[in-house]
């Protein structure tokens, strides 16, 4: 895992790290404060359950459908997805090369929402 003060992780390096963990679908890559960055590449199905912290996905490669507990949307490279802590979500009908960055942050239970006036 990269140091805590700076990081530059290429997609190739992230996928190489994951490949070195035989049978794993995700692996940690970087930690700083409450931020945890992982690479995630499910195989066949996405068995995720709701997480305790807020998370962001950025699709690295491949495509599929993202189910956010209510709606399904097509996703592909470069797409950013936010999932609040505790919410149902998963990837469906994804290609065999599908991989995404996943970033967990904030406290268990998620970050409080800011009033519109603070945005």
Image (cartoon, rainbow, N blue to C red):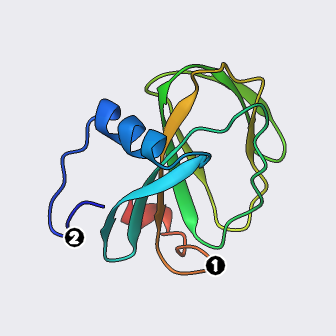
Mark 1, residues whose alpha carbon is within 10 Å: few (<14), some, or many (≥20)?
few
Please say if 74 is above or below 119: above
The quarter of the picture where the C terminus appears is bottom left
Residue at coordinates 79% horizontally, 49% vertically from top-left? Answer: 47
Q: What secondary structure is marked by label 1?
A: loop
Q: Position of residue 51 (x, y in %)?
A: 67, 66
Q: Nearer the viewer, mark 1 or mark 2?
A: 2
Please say if 102 is above or below 75: below
In the rendered image, which quarter is residue 70 located in? top right
Which one is earlier in the sequence, the residue at label 1 or at label 2?
A: 2
How far is mark 1 from mark 2, CA to CA?
Answer: 23 Å
Q: Position of residue 55 (x, y in %)?
A: 54, 58
Residue at coordinates 43% horizontally, 26% vertically from top-left? Answer: 78
In front: 12, or 19?
Answer: 19
Relative to residue 108, is residue 67 drawn left or right? right
In front: 1, or 70?
Answer: 1
Residue 109, numbered circle: 1
Q: Position of residue 77 (x, y in %)?
A: 47, 22
**Do we see residue 67 in this rendering?**
no
Relative to residue 118, is residue 46 drawn left or right? right
Which residue has dot 2 on it?
Answer: 4
Relative to residue 37, is residue 33 drawn left or right? left
Please say if 81 is above or below 59: below
């Amino acid at each position: 895992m990269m140091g805590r003060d700076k990081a530059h992780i290429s997609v190739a390096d992230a996928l190489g790290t994951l490949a070195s963990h035989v049978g794993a679908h995700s692996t940690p890559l970087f930690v700083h404060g409450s931020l945890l960055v992982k690479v995630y590449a499910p195989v066949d199905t996405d068995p995720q359950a709701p997480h305790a912290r807020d998370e962001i996905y950025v699709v690295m490669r491949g495509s599929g459908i993202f189910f956010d507990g209510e709606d399904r949307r097509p996703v592909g490279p470069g797409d950013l997805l936010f999932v609040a802590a505790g919410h149902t979500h998963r990837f469906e009908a994804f290609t065999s090369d599908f991989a995404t960055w996943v970033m967990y942050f904030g406290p268990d239970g998620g970050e409080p929402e800011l009033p519109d006036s603070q945005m």
